[in-house]
Image (spheres, rainbow, N blue to C red):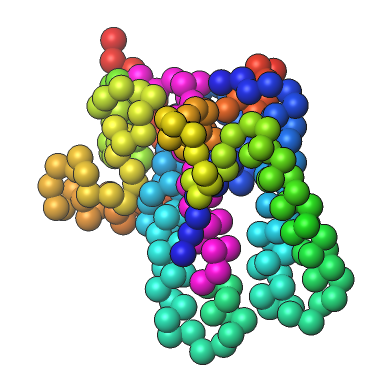
Amino acid sequence: MEIGRERLEMLKEIMAIDFSLIELNLYLDTHPMDQRALNLHNDYVMKIDRLKENYQKKYALLTSCHISDCPWEWISDPWPWEIDYEMGRD
Amino acid sequence: MWIYEKKLQFPAWVEGCDLKIAGLLFAQYGGPDSELSAGLRYLTQRYTMPIPEAKAVLTKCIIFTKEVSMVEAQYQQLSMEDIDLKVGDRLYKEEKLYAEVVGISSSLYFLDKPGSTSGIPDARMKEHLIKEILYGSYRLEQVRFG
């Protein structure tokens, strides 16, 4: 399912930063004194908060804990595995 | 606990038809050393882990989330019609049949997973196959019915 270039780019950005945050979290668990990694983590947290807020305002919910219109918005397509991340390119 | 977000950890892309790769993905999806079993193992190990760093590593959304995200990314790969499994396709190892596509090809659980107990005819066969899977080498090939 194609979701439009702009939305896809934003979603990919969110996915990329979250991916980095997961790896940073794992690293910081065993290197809690690494100030450089901590700064990076804090930067990404601020960035991801803004991005997710914008994405959810503009396109669709990422999590179910939001105020919803009727009908219940959470069940609307597409789900992550239904999205065409390559925009039809081979 | 965990919160589901409508996104993938990493987008995966599959093209072409390769039954061997499909077999390996199924094993990694739900087999004995799969992301699923690793995630559950880590979650259990943390209860007896004395070191805070390691407790964090084992617990944190991180590990389990990572494994489950892998599962989702793999599902994305497996559910692609591109793999083109046909009903009747079989996976062989050491001349022994260990999996066969018995239902609609694009659906996940119609194919037996290595190490699982489903679809294996008797106990001796099952023991043999599990040993083959654990200690033997993979040789998968594709057989189409007429």
x and y percentages locating residue B84 in the rendered image: 44, 20
Query: Depth check: B72 or B112 in front?
Result: B72
Asked whether residue B73 appears in the rendered view, the answer is no
Residue at 72 percent across and 73 percent down: it is: A28
Q: Which residues are magenta?
A: B59-86
Q: Say which residue appears at 64% left-offset and 39% top-offset.
A: A56
* Residue A42, percent from left and from top: 79, 65
Give residue B13's quadrant in the image: top right
Quarter of the image that includes the C terminus of chain B:
top left
Q: Is residue B47 magenta?
A: no
Outermost residue, left direction?
B122
Q: Decide if residue B74 is on the left or right side of residue B101.
A: right
Q: Position of residue B32 (x, y in %)?
A: 37, 57
Q: Is residue B28 above or below residue A8?
A: below
Query: What count of labels does the image hold?
Result: 0
- Residue A54 in view of the camera: yes
Residue B128 shown left or right of residue B74 in the figure: left
- The residue depicted at 72 percent of the width and 40 percent of the height is A54
Q: Residue at x 58, y 85 (%)?
A: B52
Dividing the picture into quarters, in which one does residue A38 lie? bottom right
Chief SS of the magenta region: helix
